[in-house]
Image (spheres, rainbow, N blue to C red):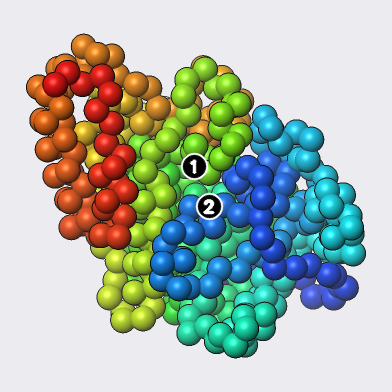
Amino acid sequence: MTSAASEEIWKSWHKTGADGHARPRPGAGPHPGVSVGLDSDAEWTTLHEEITRRGDVWVGVSAQRIGVQGGPVLVPVTGAAGLAGKGLTAIDPARYGTLNHPGDGFSYDILTQVARAVRGGAGLDGLRPQRLIAAGESQSAYALVTYHSGVQPLTHAFDGFLVHSRGATGLGLVGPGENADLVSVLNDTPTIFRTDLDAPVLDVQTESDLTGVLDSARARQPDNPRLRLWEVAGTAHADARLLGPAAAVLDCGVPINNGPLHFVAKAALRALAVWLTTGAQPPVAPRIEVAAGGEPHITRDADGIAVGGIRTPPVDVPVSALSGAGGPNTSTICALAGSSRPFTSSRLGELYSSTADYRRRYDEAAKSAVDSGFILTADLESLLNAADTTGITS
């Protein structure tokens, strides 16, 4: 799939000063970014096992105004309705009532100031970071596209970027007191990552990010010495792990995606850290096959599983059709949540002669994913334990 795309170099920036009081923070609630109307910790939810076992430091930043002061809810989620759109100042005024966010035009500078403070060891009990990685998912990933193009060349605040589930564009710039208007940029000219910066980017995209509302396939670009694009088959923008307890009450007409995105994302974080430390570049990943006839759509096999992309055992040795495509409920959150459609017993019988046959093939696929660099050896046992023999005749 090809499309026109711009390697945006922002030539102007807000020069208005503002008084504000924001904070690094722990997060809570459903986690597809502030689009659900809540401050959230999507990257911690996805990556915390890798962060803690390496002994790294994670700092969450409440950079966007909606999470702090409240604002419009772009993606309503069952289970979050009582809190969505209120912001921290209204949810817990005793703790957060003094926070003041001057508007999303300043969110990029908030991120820069936190990066500088963290690099200097502020709040880290004597630790001094050797490398700083900016990571963000969903709407925060849109913002990181803009930050990488327009702010990083001025500040050099980060050593690398882990961009997770971006759309085709960057997040737009707004004035003082305004919330970022994500909806207004969805159909803009695609924005690709600049190729003239030192800080490398590892861009992890779920299957559902490529088409539909995010349409990130429009912003595809070739891998280069400062960029890797990993597209993960059988994964969704807001899967069961990311949604947490809200997944249990979400009625999308089919079970939502419970694919292995977090395993690949943890490998991406490790690969980026190694890239920064040793210069060894992450592996090049195959692209998911996207057909461009009419409305762009993902090419699928007979079971509805995407062709191409990074492969994992639940995709290549399946017991259900893991997909980024949603079910019959066409709400935005269900479109982002994808689907996991269990195979019938007859289909399982066609695929696997026995439980032992399934197990052997699953284990081989897991080891292949590790050998390819898209799953960490440290996660192999957990991935093997995720094998599901339910319904397979011994």
Q: Residue 139 versus residue 244: which sits nearer the camera? A: 244
Q: CA distance from mark 1 to mark 2?
A: 8 Å
Circle 1: is it few (<14), some (14-19), or many (20+) Cα within 10 Å? many
Q: Hey, which quadrant is residue 53 in on the image?
A: bottom left
- Amino acid identity at mark 2: Thr
| Vertical arrangement, residue 16 with respect to residue 301, above or below | below
Q: Hey, which quadrant is residue 26 in on the image?
A: bottom right
Q: Which mark is residue 241?
A: 1
Q: Residue 39 versus residue 9: which sits nearer the camera? A: 39
Decide: marks 1, 2 in contact (CB < 8 A)?
Answer: yes
Q: Residue 28 versus residue 176: which sits nearer the camera? A: 28
Judge whether residue 227 can be spotted in this image. Answer: no
Can you identify the residue that label 2 sits on? 45
Residue at position x 46%, y 66% in the image: 52
Image quarter where the C terminus lies is top left
The picture places residue 106, in percent across and down from the top left corner, at 76, 67
The picture places residue 235, in percent across and down from the top left corner, at 40, 39
| Vertical arrangement, residue 175 with respect to residue 251, above or below | below
Judge whether residue 258 can be spotted in this image. Answer: yes
Q: Which mark is residue 75?
A: none
Secondary element under disc 1, as helix, strand or loop, is helix
The picture places residue 327, in percent across and down from the top left corner, at 48, 21
